[in-house]
Amino acid sequence: MDEWRFFCLITSRVPVFEQPSLAHIALTLLQHTLAQHGAQLWGYVILPDSVQAVLETEHEAAYHHAIEAFKTASETAICEKIRADHPDLVDAITFYNPAWSKPVYLIWQGGYQTQLLPSAYALSNKIADLVQRPVELGLAATPADWPFSSYQPPE
């Protein structure tokens, strides 16, 4: 396979992306991290409790490396932003075990869901589904109303 196209669903432990500043951090780091790893970002949507993306890489291992790098970078940045500016969310992201020397701050659930998209047709359908999700969930009246998606209105 020359190109590996994937749909990825990364779920947060709590709906932190209801805060636009946190959704913006996630979007910026998604674009930056994937570009650093040579991945082409074809489409995305950031919902209150998840980041969903369609991307292409040269091989499957590159996909997994890019997603893990995004999760690591975004978790650090988002946790720092929450601790600095959103004290109401700190308890929701704080995990503590008496055996640990300090609390751990976590945004993402373990792992992520992956779907291989075998054709350009599957890729385009998945992107169309992504940009409709905010409308289907009642978060926006039209795809253009949702600021954290790759929707581009027709010209």
Image (cartoon, helix red, strand yellow):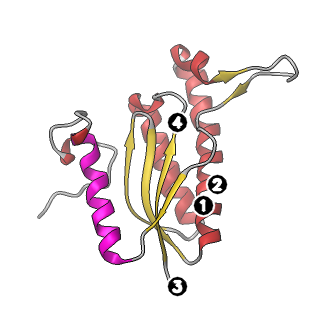
Q: Marks 3/1: CA distance?
A: 19 Å
Q: Is residue 58 left or right of residue 127?
A: right
In the picture of the structure, the residue carrying the numbered disc 3 is 1
Disc 4 to disc 2, how far (Cα)? 16 Å
* Disc nearest the viewer among 4 and 1: 4
Which callout, 4 or 3, points at the residue further toward the start of the chain?
3
Q: Compared to 16, does 91 lie above or below? A: above
Main structural element of the magenta stretch: helix, strand or loop? helix
The residue wearing badge 1 is 66
- Bounds of the magenta segment: 119-135
Which mark, by number, is residue 117? none
Mark sitting on residue 69: 2
Relative to residue 77, is residue 117 depicted above or below? Answer: below
Q: Residue furthest bottom?
A: 2
- Distance CA(mark 1)–CA(mark 2): 5 Å
| C-alpha gap between disc 4 and disc 1 | 17 Å
Give the number of the mark in front: 4 or 2.
4
Picture coordinates of residue 5 (x, y %)? Answer: 46, 71
Tell me if residue 128 is in the magenta stretch. Answer: yes
Residue at image position (13%, 62%) is: 154
Q: Secondary structure at mark 2?
A: helix
- Looking at the rendered structure, the kind of residue marked 3 is Met
